[in-house]
Amino acid sequence: MKDKCGIVGIHSKDSSKDVSHLIYYGLYALQHRGQESAGIATHNINFGLNYHCGMGLVTDVFNNALIKSLAGNVGIGHVRYSTTGASKLESSQPFFTDLNDGFIAIAHNGDIVNSGALRDELSKKGYEFKSDTDSEVVCYLIKEEHKEETDILKIIDNVSQKLIGSYSLVILINDELYVLRDPMAMKPLVLGETEDFYVVASESVAFDVMNAELIRDFKPGELIYFKDNKINSYILPSAKGSKLAHCMFEYVYFARPDSVIDEKSVYNTRLKIGEALYEEFPIDADLVLPVPDSSIPAAIGYARASGIPYGEGLIKNRYVGRTFIMPTQAEREIAVRLKVNPLRHELKGKRVVVIDDSIVRGTTSESLVKILKAAGAKEVHMLIGCPPVMAPCFYGVAMATKEELIAANMSIEDIRQKLGAETLGYISIESLVKAIGIDESKLCLGCLNEDYPTEIPDDLEAESYYDYYNRLSDSEDEE
Ligand code: SF4
């Protein structure tokens, strides 16, 4: 699974201070949210829009000279992992377009489920799209509203009313930065500051690298802008009374453990997930080990609660990127071995509890159990820090279709047998909600219980895992 994107926005309190280097560092800290492309747009006092985007990691796309050339005292940045639109330069962000009095550039984290219908409307009005992404749709919607209305707050409220789905947006309109979190607050968005800058980002880890202080999370439906060097907060009138739907997967898997989202430490939540797994599955074992890296805190939590020693039975190869689809189980095992290698002397003859953050299609878990047993583990007890994933995500998470989700098609006992594990246990929804510490009514649990927080258009289909990977491979071939 991949989350869609990470965003950063910076407003300098002093017009002589450039923001591009800080945006770069912020994007670097958010690299886990998107590895396919990166981009920065700034406003330069002499010539307006200053812009660079490229394919690859932040360090592939930018160098010192480029960052210096992006001089400007306000700007936005984006890292992308495509869930809609092909993986190609035209889909990279920020998007920009001209306005009658300058330009607009936007960067977006989330997914607009009704973007198809909105795109058709804009096409009829003569808009030509350079990509097939929903973020470009939002850019043109703002441009269209701007023709009739000059009040930016009204424009953004009008556009927000048309959008169904998840969106955290940084919007640069000439030299002004506007930042919006959708009314359901599905994707994270935080506000901070240094002595010289106001900063916003998808996750608070971006502030740590900038040495910025976290002020707070954006409120649902909150638009913040920095006119007169002040933080101006405006709750969209249309957002008032909206239900909340924070994505539970940010806590389970996507966000970095050192982030704090909606006042909850992601690391602590994962520790509690591990403790809850022990309460629900108190297994007699010799060793608790994580599937690295995202399951490490939960495995520590399980080890602390159980008193069973924590160990590293699997070592991650940090240099493996995307692996190709492996059609046979033997090939899939090679792909998993590329990513994690078992420590035979740690595993030999031991009963191991393996903590993983989630199971989607089940193919990796099957390979993992085989690898652990081949390395000498006597018993393998798989415990999962996310309840069974029963349905696709339509809000910006590349997952799979229902047909591909193993838990949607098999009982837990059948999955256990298929994996070849002695135990297979998933945390319950109740325990997960308790570990996150946010009321269930304020969380999105759509992929767990199909209770989606918005309507889903009839013609919107989740992308197949296989189509998704083929799309990425095709894009690579074209480059
Ligand atoms: S459906 Fe699942 S992954 Fe998607 S936003 Fe909701 S909780 Fe997050």
Image (spheres, rainbow, N blue to C red):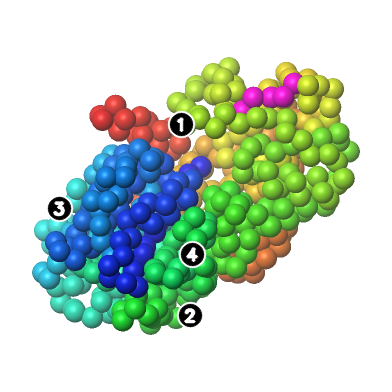
The residue that disc 3 covers is 128
Tell me what residue is drawn at x 43 percent, y 48 percent.
28
Closer to the camera: disc 2 or disc 1? 1
Q: Is residue 62 above or below residue 76?
A: above
Q: Residue 288 appears in which quarter of the rendering?
A: top right
Q: Which residues are magenta?
A: 340-344
**Label 2, label 1: how far apart the Cα atoms are:** 41 Å
The residue that disc 4 covers is 212
Circle 4: element type: loop
The residue that disc 1 covers is 322
The three-letter amino acid code for the residue at tag 1 is Arg
Whether label 2 touches label 1, CB < 8 Å: no
The three-letter amino acid code for the residue at tag 2 is Gly
- Label 1 CB, ligand 1: below 8 Å? no
Whether label 2 touches label 3, CB < 8 Å: no
**Label 2, label 4: how far apart the Cα atoms are:** 32 Å
- The main secondary structure of the magenta stretch is strand
Whether label 1 touches label 4, CB < 8 Å: no
Q: If you read the primary sequence from the N terminus, does the residue marked by circle 2 or circle 1 appear first? A: 2
Circle 3: element type: loop
The residue that disc 2 covers is 241
The three-letter amino acid code for the residue at tag 3 is Glu
Q: If you read the primary sequence from the N terminus, does the residue marked by circle 3 or circle 1 appear first? A: 3
**Label 1, label 4: how far apart the Cα atoms are:** 32 Å
Q: Is residue 213 above or below residue 327?
A: below
Residue 274: give x, y in percent of width and height: 74, 49
Which of the pair 430/180 is nearer the observer? 180
